Amino acid sequence: MTETTSVAADQLKTIVERLERLLEEVDGLKGDIKEVYAEAGANGFDVKTLRKIIALRRKDHDERIEEEAMLTLYLEALGMA
């Protein structure tokens, strides 16, 4: 192998190893999140509703308002509001 190829291979290996470590951390965090939801459920909170609240809070305010307006419009069109 040439020196350039060797350097590129080393960089690639480093990147792959970093990604693997980060993915391991993500897996650990997913486990932690699952535990928190389980704790919330054990304390009487509705986990499905909590997940929706978290999803809403992660959205931009304007995006959330627009989505809620569209939902209301569709519900009204279907006679569900």
Image (spheres, rainbow, N blue to C red):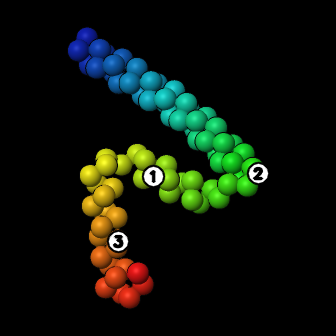
Identify the mark nearer the N-term, 3 or 1. Answer: 1
Residue kind at label 3, given as amino acid type: Leu
Name, please, the residue furthest toward the bottom.
Answer: 79
Report which quarter residue 33 is drawn in: top right
At a point 40% along the width and 20% down the height, the residue shown is: 14
Q: Is residue 1 visible?
A: no
Q: Is residue 73 visible?
A: yes
Residue 4 image position (x, y, % from top left): 23, 15
Report which quarter residue 18 is drawn in: top left
Residue 26 image position (x, y, % from top left): 53, 35
Identify the mark nearer the N-term, 2 or 3. Answer: 2
Circle 3 or circle 1, nearest the eye: 3
Q: Residues within 10 Å of mark 3 (few under 14, many from 20)?
A: few
At a point 51% along the width and 27% down the height, the residue shown is: 21
Instruction: Give the spatial CA distance, label 2 vs label 1.
Output: 21 Å
Callout 3 secondary element:
helix
On screen, residue 12 versus residue 47, left or right, reads: left
On screen, residue 24 versus residue 44, left or right, reads: left
Instruction: Give the spatial CA distance, label 2 vs label 3.
Output: 31 Å
Q: Quadrant of the C terminus?
A: bottom left
At a point 73% along the width and 55% down the height, the residue shown is: 44
Identify the mark nearer the N-term, 2 or 1. Answer: 2
The residue under label 2 is 42
18 or 7, which lies in front? 18
Residue 55: numbered disc = 1
Total numbered badges shown on the rendered structure: 3
Residue 78 image position (x, y, % from top left): 36, 87
Residue 71: numbered disc = 3
At a point 37% along the width and 80% down the height, the residue shown is: 75
Q: Quadrant of the N terminus?
A: top left
Residue kind at label 1, given as amino acid type: Ala
Instruction: Give the spatial CA distance, label 3 vs label 1.
Output: 15 Å
